[in-house]
Amino acid sequence: MELPARDGELVQIMDAGLAEAARKAGAWLACRPGCTQCCHGTFAINELDAQRLRVGMERLRGGNSALAAAVEKRAEAWIAEYGAGFPGKLSSGLLGESDEEQARFEEYANEAACPALDGATGLCDVYAWRPMTCRVFGPPVRSAGPEGEQGLGHCELCFDEATAEQVAACEMPVPVELEQEILAEMGAAGETIVAFALLRPVS
């Protein structure tokens, strides 16, 4: 299975949005190679994110098998260490959807380094294929709160001493509707985490 055709459009929009937000933010945006704050802690990814990572790993195996093997080794070690507490099905890597499982996930592997992270270089080995959550971490991004209110959040390391107006001027728009349309076309169901997506081959 290849990636949905419109995933390229989604990634292009995201990359352009990040570049523009970074241009506006200048020194306020602390994101630099080697800054790995956003590479620690586990988060859910949808099927489109997972498929993009799988395709990326296939391409990595074909172009740099040693690097792909290193990523797989880290993913296997990650699952060996944290798999016992995984709030879902280890056989499929899908997160559970019950209230109890969702609550457990809130506290799950919160300090763990992402297996895609090269600890020696501080770089992501699958950067070109990273999930949407990774692509929006850093610049100001608008999201809905628990009560449906809209808030503008950014990495705590960024925008030091910037005013609310200055932060708002650097907002990065996110094409949420396009992503949801692609997921609907895929018939995607369930969420997983990066470690499982890195190891599961393209089907």
Image: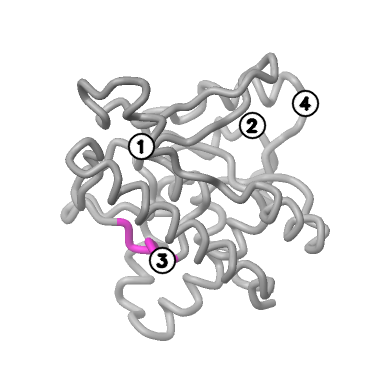
Of circles 3 and 1, the one toward us is 3
- Mark 1 or 4, nearer chain start: 1
Residue type at tag 4 = Ser
Q: What is the CA distance from the residue labelled 4 to the residue labelled 3?
A: 33 Å
Please name the residue that numbered disc 3 is placed on. 128
Where the N terminus falls, by quadrant?
bottom right
Please name the residue that numbered disc 2 is placed on. 87
Of circles 2 and 3, the one toward us is 3
Residue at (44, 27) in percent of width and height:
153
196 sits left or right of 110 in the view:
right
Residue 123: x and y, percent?
Answer: 25, 56
Residues rendered magenta in the picture: 124-128
Vertical arrangement, residue 93 with respect to residue 48, above or below: above
Q: Which mark is residue 98?
A: 4
Which quadrant of the view contains residue 104? top right
Residue 189: x and y, percent?
Answer: 78, 50
Residue type at tag 3 = Ala
Q: Residue furthest top?
A: 147
Q: What is the CA distance from the residue labelled 2 to the residue labelled 1?
A: 18 Å
Please name the residue that numbered disc 1 is placed on. 40
Q: What is the CA distance from the residue labelled 2 to the residue labelled 4?
A: 9 Å
Where the C terminus falls, by quadrant?
bottom right
Residue at (21, 44) in percent of width and height:
26
Residue type at tag 2 = Pro
